[in-house]
Image (tube, rainbow, N blue to C red):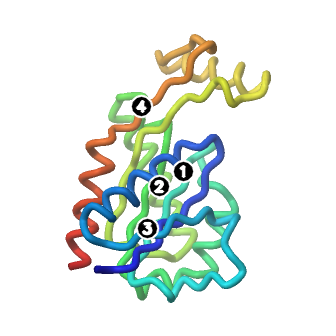
């Protein structure tokens, strides 16, 4: 049984939801997961207290959260010493086109290049449109982007595109590699 840290950054909450599901799968696989938001780490937090780590972040305006990039870059040496995995939550992947998936994979590649981290596994996770959590301007902008991409534009509803089977498969593969 490995102590696995699931460390994440989230803006509207989809990466947090994915992090929780990752932890559930890890626990079902016989591991001991701890879920921690990067911004809300306890004072006594030490990455090296864990046997493995999964980091997750979401993409906004073509970049993962700055605070996630900063943390990973500052701790790349430690992350590279541990068995590790990275998941990236992206609406680009939710477009359903190969071009959208390619953009989402490029965001992952840029993140890893910028931070110097080389996780053992990576996953692109289609995100969600959470119109109910957006302010007026962001809701308008997101609706225009969704309209241009042929996506969901009824702002009275939120839309989740995450493929939970893929998330569970990615996590199960990583969990198996720890045994």
> Is 176 above or below relative to 110?
below
Residue topped by disc 3:
54
In the foreground, 99 or 162: 162
- For the residues marked 1 and 2, what is the alpha-carbon distance in whole angstroms? 5 Å
Q: Can residue 61 be seen in the rendering of this structure?
A: no
Mark in the foreground, 2 or 3: 2
Query: Does label 1 or label 3 sit earlier along the sequence?
Result: 1
Secondary structure category for the residue under label 4: loop
Residue at x-position 39% and y-position 35%: 99
- For the residues marked 2 and 3, what is the alpha-carbon distance in whole angstroms? 9 Å
Left or right of 56 in this view: 33: left
Secondary structure category for the residue under label 3: strand
> Is 20 above or below relative to 100?
below
- For the residues marked 3 and 4, what is the alpha-carbon distance in whole angstroms? 21 Å
Left or right of 17 in this view: 168: left
- For the residues marked 4 and 1, what is the alpha-carbon distance in whole angstroms? 15 Å
Tag 1–tag 2 contact (CB < 8 Å)? yes
**The disc label shown at residue 16, or none:** 1
Query: Does label 2 or label 4 sit earlier along the sequence?
Result: 2
**Residue 120 percent location from the top left of the image:** 33, 72
């Amino acid at each position: 049984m490995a102590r696995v840290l699931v460390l994440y950054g989230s803006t509207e909450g989809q990466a947090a939801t994915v992090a929780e599901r990752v932890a559930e799968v890890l626990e079902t696989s016989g591991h001991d997961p701890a879920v921690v938001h990067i911004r809300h780490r306890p004072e006594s937090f030490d990455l090296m207290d864990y046997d493995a780590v999964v980091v997750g972040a979401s993409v906004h305006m073509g970049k993962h959260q700055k605070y996630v990039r900063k943390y990973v870059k500052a701790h790349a040496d430690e992350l590279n010493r541990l068995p590790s995995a990275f998941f990236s939550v992206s609406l680009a992947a939710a477009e359903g086109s190969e071009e959208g998936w390619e953009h989402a994979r490029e965001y992952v590649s840029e993140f890893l290049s910028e931070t110097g981290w080389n996780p053992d596994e990576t996953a692109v996770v289609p995100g969600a449109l959470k119109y109910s959590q957006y302010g007026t301007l962001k809701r308008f902008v997101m609706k225009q982007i969704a309209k241009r991409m042929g996506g969901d534009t009824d702002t009275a509803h939120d839309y989740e595109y995450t493929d939970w089977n893929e998330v569970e498969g990615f996590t199960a593969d990583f969990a198996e590699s720890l045994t």
